[in-house]
């Protein structure tokens, strides 16, 4: 029985994969443990960051030439809109508080606003005989 299992293709494949993993692990640990590897990894990271920055800068210039806002422009616009919205909300709260002091019966700003009556009528259909 044991001879059959040693000739089993899956056992052979499993042992080959295991040996390959051990050899690759040993080689990788040897290579990554050196100062040269850490220096080259650091250099590669720096180069990647510089390339990314240059691409971002060029993209911003191209978008500017085409009158299209960049990601930063949209983000700044969003912040400005949020600030405006916050200011309007504070003004609305202040107006509500002031209206309560002036007219205590007004509990909500929507109840105190009266809509004008609807007086406009639909145009009549004209006969073209």
Image: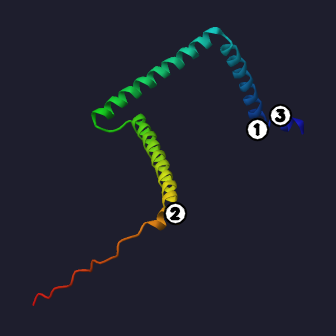
Q: Nearer the viewer, mark 3 or mark 1?
A: 1
Which is more N-terminal, label 2 or label 3? 3
Q: Quadrant of residue 62?
A: top left
Q: Quadrant of residue 41?
A: top right
**Residue at the extreme front of the image, as rendered:** 102
**Residue at the extreme bottom of the image, as rendered:** 129
Q: Residue 108 bears which disc, if any? A: 2
Q: How is the image coloured?
A: rainbow
Residue at numbered disc 3: 6
- Indicate the position of residue 102 as horizontal and vertical percent values: 48, 59
Residue beneath the point at 46% across and 39% down: 79
27 to 69, vertically: above or below: above
Which is more N-terminal, label 1 or label 2? 1
In the depicted view, which residue is nearer to us: 107 or 12? 107
104 to 1, vertically: above or below: below
In the depicted view, which residue is nearer to us: 27 or 127? 127
Can you say which quadrant of the picture contains the N terminus?
A: top right
Residue at numbered disc 1: 10
Can you say which quadrant of the picture contains the C terminus?
A: bottom left
32 to 68, vertically: above or below: above
- Mark 3–mark 1 Cα distance, whole angstroms, equals 9 Å
Q: Secondary structure at mark 3?
A: helix
Q: Residues within 10 Å of mark 2 (few under 14, many from 20)?
A: few
Q: Secondary structure at mark 1?
A: helix
- Indicate the position of residue 19 as horizontal and vertical percent values: 75, 25
Q: Residues within 10 Å of mark 1 (few under 14, many from 20)?
A: few
Q: Secondary structure at mark 2?
A: loop
């Amino acid at each position: 029985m044991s001879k059959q299992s040693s000739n089993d293709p899956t056992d052979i494949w499993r042992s080959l994969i295991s040996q390959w993993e051990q050899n690759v692990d040993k080689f990788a640990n040897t290579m990554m443990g050196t100062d040269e590897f850490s220096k080259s990894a650091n250099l590669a990271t720096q180069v990647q960051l510089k390339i990314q920055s240059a691409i971002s800068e060029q993209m911003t210039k191209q978008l500017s030439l085409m009158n299209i806002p960049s990601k930063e422009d949209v983000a700044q616009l969003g912040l400005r809109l949020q600030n405006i919205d916050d200011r309007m909300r504070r003004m609305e709260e202040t107006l509500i508080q002031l209206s309560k002091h002036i007219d205590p019966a007004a509990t909500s700003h929507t109840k105190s606003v009266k809509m004008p009556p609807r007086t406009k009528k639909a145009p009549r259909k004209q006969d073209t005989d």
